[in-house]
Image (cartoon, grey):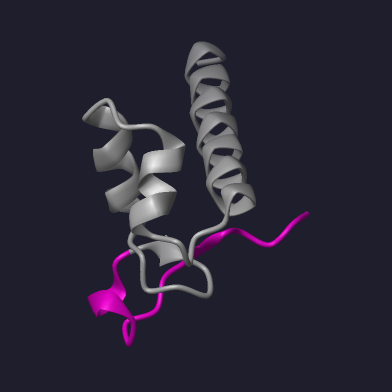
Amino acid sequence: MKPSVIKIDPEIMSGAPCFAGTRVPIQHLLDYLEGGDSIGEFREDFPTVTHEQVIAFLKEAKESVLDRACANSAR
């Protein structure tokens, strides 16, 4: 299993989930996307986050949602 691109450390941004190796909270990406901004616009403002990290996070989020949906439907 690949290591997560999400890092939670109480010493970094008060423990907010961040992109590993950065001080950029995951919530910032979600806020940008919710506001209609593109991944490119997000990365322009947060250049320490790579395109690969963004895509890996979105894949992790997708897998998590699908796993939960499958688990709930099996009940």
Height in image: 20 above or below 73? Answer: below
* Residue depicted at 64% across the width and 49% down the height: 52
To which quarter of the image does residue 23 belong? bottom left
Q: In the figure, is residue 25 to the left or right of 72? A: left
* Viewer-proximal residue among 16 and 35: 35
* Residue depicted at 53% across the width and 46% down the height: 54
The answer to if 44 sits in the magenta stretch is no
* Viewer-proximal residue among 29 and 75: 29
Q: Quadrant of the N terminus?
A: bottom right
* Viewer-proximal residue among 68 and 33: 33
* Residue depicted at 45% across the width and 73% down the height: 22
Height in image: 63 above or below 24? Answer: above
Magenta: main secondary structure equals: loop
- Residue 35 in the image: x percent, y percent? 21, 30
* Residue depicted at 23% across the width and 78% down the height: 14
To which quarter of the image does residue 41 belong? top left
Start-end of magenta stretch: 1-16
- Residue 55 in the image: x percent, y percent? 59, 41
Q: Residue pushed farthest bottom?
A: 11
Height in image: 55 above or below 71? Answer: below
* Viewer-proximal residue among 7 and 65: 7
- Residue 25 in the image: x percent, y percent? 33, 61
The answer to if 10 sits in the magenta stretch is yes
Q: Residue pushed farthest top?
A: 73
- Residue 43 in the image: x percent, y percent? 43, 51
